[in-house]
Image: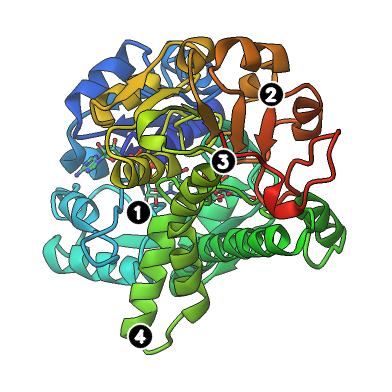
């Protein structure tokens, strides 16, 4: 099938390259001409494991091409995926500016051509597919028959390629049975259940799924805080909870909370949309509020372990919003840096991320020194905070921490390190929701357990 993808970002590129790999002829279009120039040379503009190989092999096979003019795609492709960004507006609403700008530029196709299907894959408020179809039908000549369908995307960054080929589910929200049939056939080569539904239900299913994940994470973080206050060990609590199949083990990790370009913005958008619809989402609203407090909570814990932080050097291990990506959109590291600078003006901050350093250097204030290795960042540091649980950080030995740092104090914001082993070897490693470190040779009371230096 001849198809086009408009918006060659994380979703668009994985989708386009994926369908090309399944044998279709795909053109990926983006208004960012720099990005298109890079892609045409086989350069992937961001870190996404496995994507380069799929792009390169399909470009070589002539199945995947790139362009920067969305207006004519309906003349050339019978199926168009819209994967443009839908960022947060000023009050949490989702901005559909990019989506409407694409829809309003589509030119008519000739009367001899078949009906077109436009699939909205971007995450959008409920009712958007209907509005898009009405807008197109108003503007295009009568012979241009078009169906706008919602197939929300559930892939995760860092495993977008795997998630394309092994989706958890494919939700097809359509008002036209022929379109549903065509799209069902198209997706049948992929594993995962196909849910055929209406457009509004598909749109809400996407927003609700991300909001549910956000609520689960905030719940985990609040229980972890309670574990700290009551002397329980949160990872053990999470393990026990997760063994109940009704709860499940996923998305129960406590730490610095959820970031990225999806969970925070989609949860805010759901709250905003729900307020307007008269069905307030108080749980999701609370989850967003609880999440926003976590960086400050981490800084307070650092203050409990380190006197006069303004005169100290603190290292952030990890900057990306999660491992496997160089994406720093709404990364917890950004809020953490802002809190450190706000509460302790003059503090020295160094940072290192295995993949996000280049992005970070463009994004971070000049007060943060982005280093090329963990060793360089940790050199002479008075404390470190594990912000992103990259595997590389688990491999740093206790002796390395002790040799490189001025004081080996690690605030493990993702419970990623082996705290017990590090503590046993003289490194103070303080996790989230964990029992405080009790030095072997003393019977200190809990509140005195971590000596302040
Ligand atoms: N990132 C994810 O893992 C993920 C997963 C599922 C769903 N989503 C949703 O999918 C959508 C896209 O997300 P993303 O992370 O791929 O975004 P992205 O920012 O990586 O990519 C969006 C692309 O759209 C392009 N674009 C913007 N306006 C355009 C226009 N008028 N014409 C052509 N191209 C245009 C941008 O230049 C950019 O390359 C969002 O709605 C997001 O919420 C994202
Ligand atoms: O137990 C957990 C799990 C995740 N996180 C954090 O939550 C954020 C989001 O993680 P994840 O969901 O893995 O990343 P995304 O790539 O943003 O994927 C989410 O957002 C996408 C865009 O909508 C959806 O398609 C995916 O299904 C959904 O998981 C990250 O900051 C993680 O560190 C936690 O704090 N604790």
Is ligand 1 within 8 Å of the beta carbon of the residue shown at mark 1? no
Which residue has dot 1 on it?
Answer: 118
Comparing 273 with 34, the one in front is 273
- Label 2 crowd bin: few (<14), some (14–19), many (20+), radius 10 Å: few
Point out the frontmost of discs 4 and 2.
2
**Image spot of residue 353 (x, y percent):** 47, 23
Regarding residue 1, the answer to whether it shows in the image is no
- Going from N to C along the chain, the mark reached first, 3 or 2, is 3
Residue 16 placement, left or right of 443: left
Residue matched to label 4: 277
Could you tell me how far apart the alpha carbons at marks 1 and 2 are, in whole angstroms?
45 Å
Give percent across and percent down for residue 370. 36, 19
Q: Which residue is tagged 3?
A: 305
Residue 82 position in % (x across, y down): 34, 48
Residue 60, image quadrant: top left
Residue at the spot 43% in from the left edge and 28% down from the top edge: 326
| Residue 279 placement, left or right of 110 | right
Distance between the alpha carbons at the discs numbered 3 and 2: 22 Å
Q: How many marks?
A: 4
Q: Which of the image's four quarters has the N terminus?
A: top left
Q: Secondary structure at mark 2?
A: helix
**N-terminal of the two: label 3 or label 4?**
4
Earlier in the chain: of badge 4 and badge 2, it is 4
- Estimate the spatial distance between the alpha carbons at disc 4 and disc 1, rounded to whole Å: 26 Å
Residue 69, above or below 110: above
Which of the numbered marks, if any, corresponds to residue 394? 2
What residue is drawn where x is 24% and y is 17%?
Answer: 37
Q: CA distance from mark 3 to mark 1?
A: 55 Å
Tag 3's secondary structure?
helix
């Amino acid at each position: 099938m001849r198809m086009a993808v408009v918006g060659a970002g994380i979703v668009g590129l994985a989708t386009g390259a994926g369908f090309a790999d399944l044998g279709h002829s795909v053109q990926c279009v983006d208004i960012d001409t720099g990005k298109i120039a890079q892609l045409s040379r086989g350069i992937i503009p961001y870190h996404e494991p496995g994507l380069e190989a799929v792009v390169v092999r399909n470009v070589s096979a002539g199945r995947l091409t790139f362009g920067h003019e969305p207006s004519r795609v309906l003349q050339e492709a019978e199926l168009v995926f819209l994967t443009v960004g839908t960022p947060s507006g000023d009050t949490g609403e989702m901005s559909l500016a990019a989506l409407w700008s694409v829809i309003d530029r589509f030119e008519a196709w000739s009367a001899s051509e078949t009906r077109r299907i436009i699939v909205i894959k971007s995450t959008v408020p409920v009712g958007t597919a209907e509005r898009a179809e009405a807008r197109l039908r108003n503007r295009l000549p009568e012979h241009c028959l078009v169906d706008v369908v919602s197939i929300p995307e559930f892939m995760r960054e860092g495993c977008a390629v795997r998630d394309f080929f092994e989706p958890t589910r494919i939700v097809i929200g359509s008002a036209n049975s022929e379109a549903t049939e065509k799209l069902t056939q198209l997706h049948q080569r992929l594993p995962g259940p196909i849910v055929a539904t209406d457009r509004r239900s598909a749109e809400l299913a996407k927003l609700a799924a991300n909001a549910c994940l956000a609520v689960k994470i905030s719940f985990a973080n609040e229980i972890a805080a309670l574990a700290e206050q009551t002397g329980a060990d949160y990872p053990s609590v999470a393990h026990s909870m997760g063994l109940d199949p009704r709860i499940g083990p996923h998305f129960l990790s406590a730490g610095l909370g959820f970031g990225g370009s999806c969970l925070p913005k989609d949860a805010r958008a759901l709250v905003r949309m729900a307020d307007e619809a008269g069905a307030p989402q108080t749980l999701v609203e609370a989850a967003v509020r609880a999440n926003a407090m976590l960086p400050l909570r981490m800084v307070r814990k650092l203050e409990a372990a380190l006197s006069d932080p303004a005169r100290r050097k603190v290292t952030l291990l990890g900057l990306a919003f999660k491992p496997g990506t160089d994406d720093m959109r709404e990364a917890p590291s950004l809020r953490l840096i802002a809190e450190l600078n706000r509460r302790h003006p003059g503090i020295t901050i160094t940072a290192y991320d295995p993949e996000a350093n280049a992005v970070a250097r463009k994004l971070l204030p000049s007060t943060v020194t982005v280093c090329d290795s963990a060793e360089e960042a940790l050199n002479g540091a008075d404390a470190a905070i594990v912000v992103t649980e990259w595997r590389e950080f688990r491999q740093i030995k206790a002796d390395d921490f002790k040799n490189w740092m001025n004081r080996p104090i690690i605030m493990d914001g993702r419970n990623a390190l082996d705290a017990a082993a590090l503590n046993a070897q003289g490194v103070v490693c303080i996790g989230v929701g964990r029992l405080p470190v009790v030095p072997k040779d003393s019977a200190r009371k809990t509140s005195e357990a971590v000596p302040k230096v």
